[in-house]
Amino acid sequence: MATNKHAIIRYQTLDKCFRNPGRKYFIEDLVEACSIAIYEFSGNNNGIKRRQVLEDIKFMESTQGWNIPLERIRDGHRVYFKYDDKSFSINNQPLNETEEIQLKEALLTLSRFKGMPQFEWVDEIYARLDSGLGLSHYNEKIIEFDQNNYLKGLEFISPIYNSILYKKAIQIEYKSFKKDISQSIIFHPYFLKQYNNRWYVFGKNDASQFIMNLALDRITSIEESKNKYLPNKTIDFDEYFEDIIGVTLSNEGKVEKVVIKASNELLPYIKTKPIHGSQKLKEQGLLHTLITLDIIPNYELESLILSFAEGVEVLHPKSLRDKIKKRVELNFSNYITNSADELHTKELNLHHE
């Protein structure tokens, strides 16, 4: 069964034609009625093919469809169509086999989000439909999403989501990793985003009027603010993340041409899972390949580059190369500061404790 909107429009149009006792609908009339209905809905004037309508009728008559009681009545050399039962309509019928399968698949997919805020209703709907659809027979686990159910801050997704939906300013108590005490922020939330198994909310800080992001696992409390909500009039979040990796975007950030040298052993992984959407292969040698990115450098880009270890080297810009070099040197110093004997002694002390 086609699931696009045009298919649904055709089924509904044919149903109305078959129910109409005041007119004889021949195949040409059905084709015209469907074409008009789709044109009125979408402006598409390409028309519907006769074969398509015949396929739709075949489906509607099948057990996968609605088992419609359709009569074919001869009128001279032509045949018109109407329901044998004048009270019949596909809208009065229970779910057909195809719809039932699709509903099962949708609910089973949603059930993977059990325990996730904003999806509490799934459990209730699932239980109510289980007896009728036999969902419990389909409980074999076949898919798993990368979700940490023990992550702090998940309980704040629902209130923040509702604040965005109903355009309410909120007061957030927030304790960053860099400060010992929490701070109170009047916040106008615009967008929720998950990255690397952590959730972030993007919005405007009422005091600074800057767009910022807050990690939900650093929030200690949320309550509605009396401040008037300041709607988002400047940022298209579909485009906001195009030039970065992750969630960190400073107000002064600019797109730069980043050039990295990747080992050819690592290249298949980088090609199949690009570092960024702007990734291009510039020059391939025997051992290494030059790759370019048009991107705003940030902490997440640095961390991703470092995750490739010796397989990747930043060539340009110098500022990013220097940052990566400094972090590599600091990491290396961890391994040369303490001798192997000292580490062995510390390990023994830990065992005794």
Image (spheres, helix red, strand yellow):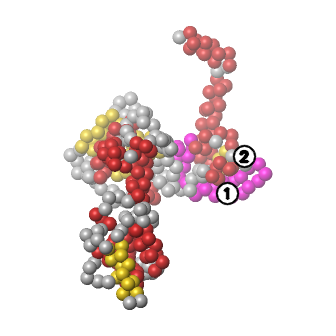
The answer to whether marks 1 and 2 mark residues whose Cβ atoms lie closer than 8 Å is no
Residue at 63% across, 52% down: 272
Is tag 1's residue or tag 2's residue first in the polypeptide sequence? 2
Q: Position of residue 275 (x, y in %)?
A: 59, 50
Q: Residue furthest right?
A: 286
Where, by quadrant of the figure, is residue 232 drawn? bottom left
Can the viewer see residue 8 in this picture? no
Q: Nearer the viewer, residue 15 or 213?
A: 15
Residue at 56% across, 9% down: 352
**Residue stretch in magenta:** 278-303
Q: Nearer the viewer, residue 44 or 272?
A: 44
Secondary structure at badge 1 equals strand
Q: Position of residue 284 (x, y in %)?
A: 74, 55
Left/right placement of residue 199 relative to residue 160 reads right
Where, by quadrant of the figure, is residue 69 drawn? bottom left
- Mark 1: few, some, or many residues within 10 Å (few <14, many ≥20)? some
Residue at 48% across, 78% down: 51
Left/right placement of residue 246 relative to residue 208 reads right
Secondary structure at badge 2 equals loop
Please name which of the two marks, 1 or 2, marks the residue nearer to the observer.
2
Which residue lies under the disc numbered 2? 265
Can the viewer see residue 83 in this picture? yes
Which residue lies under the disc numbered 1? 281
Q: Split into 4 quadrants, where in the image is the N terminus?
A: bottom left
Q: Position of residue 48 (x, y in %)?
A: 44, 79
Disc 2 residue type? Answer: Glu
Disc 1 residue type? Answer: Leu
Q: Nearer the viewer, residue 44 or 229?
A: 44
